[in-house]
Image (cartoon, rainbow, N blue to C red):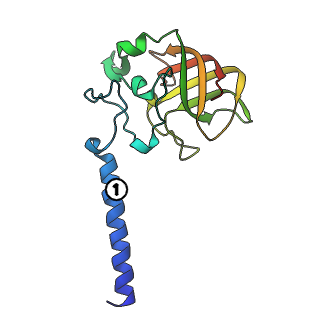
């Protein structure tokens, strides 16, 4: 095999491997569906590869729980229909862990999005609305790339004009 044929073979093999990997990620049978409890039948929603999940922590509301939402058609538009587990959290103090997507400039963020998976691009959201929470932190939270732990009052948003499902008000950082 000459050098050109060898290079073409290597590039073709790499391309085939990348395509196979992407197809594996796109196949729901090979992805982890963020639902709770473990072992329950999958709920429609966003699919995240297992490497994107933070380890679940005792005392923290998990992203698997927040994914227990389905879209239903009401008045000619799609609206979220939340599981009873989620509606029971509405108005309660919760703790949650995730990654920051800042909405303002600066080190101290008073309003930002907390998402289940680390952002890969500053212009893209890593998942759907069931995988993000709007955070309102009166004292601010120091911006960082690694996961942050927060506590605050949880709100379930039934018809938010921005399409958000969840909000955490009076949020404050929890030191690990």
Q: Which image quadrant for residue 110?
A: top right
* Residue behind mark 1: 21
The x, y position of residue 40, in whole percent, is: 27, 26
Classify 79 as above or below 121: above
Describe the element under mark 1 as helix, strand or loop: helix
Q: Residue furthest bottom?
A: 2
Residue at 58% x, 30% y is 113
For the C terminus, give its image quadrant. Answer: top right
The image position of residue 6, as x and y in percent, is 36, 83
Residue 136: percent from the left, percent from the top? 64, 21
* Residue 33 sits in quarter: top left
Q: Residue at x 53, y 15 (%)?
A: 154
Q: Residue at x 40, y 23 (%)?
A: 65
Q: Nearer the viewer, residue 50 or 116?
A: 50
The image shows residue 75 at horizontal and vertical percentages of: 34, 15
The residue at the point 34 percent across, 48 percent down is 25
Compared with residue 100, is residue 174 higher up or lower down, i.e. above or below?
Answer: above
Image position of 15 (left or right of 151): left
Which quadrant would the N terminus be assigned to in this image?
bottom left
Q: Residues within 10 Å of mark 1 (few under 14, many from 20)?
A: few
Work out whether 122 lies above or below 166. Answer: below
Q: How many marks?
A: 1
């Amino acid at each position: 095999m000459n050098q050109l044929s060898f290079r073409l073979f290597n590039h073709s093999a790499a391309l085939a491997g990348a395509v196979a990997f992407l197809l594996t990620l796109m196949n729901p049978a090979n992805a982890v569906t963020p639902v709770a409890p473990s072992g329950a039948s999958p709920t429609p929603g966003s699919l995240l590869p297992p490497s994107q999940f933070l380890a679940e922590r005792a005392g923290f509301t998990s992203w698997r729980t927040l994914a227990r939402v389905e879209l239903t058609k009401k008045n000619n538009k799609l609206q979220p229909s939340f599981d009873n587990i989620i509606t029971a959290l509405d108005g309660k103090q919760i703790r949650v862990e995730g990654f920051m997507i800042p909405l303002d400039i600066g080190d101290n963020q008073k309003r930002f999005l907390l998402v289940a998976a680390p952002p890969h691009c500053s212009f893209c959201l890593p998942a759907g609305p069931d995988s993000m929470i709007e955070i309102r932190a009166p004292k601010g939270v120091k911006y960082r790339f690694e996961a942050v732990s927060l506590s605050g009052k949880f709100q379930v948003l039934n018809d938010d004009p921005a399409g958000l499902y969840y909000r955490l008000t009076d949020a404050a950082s929890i030191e690990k």
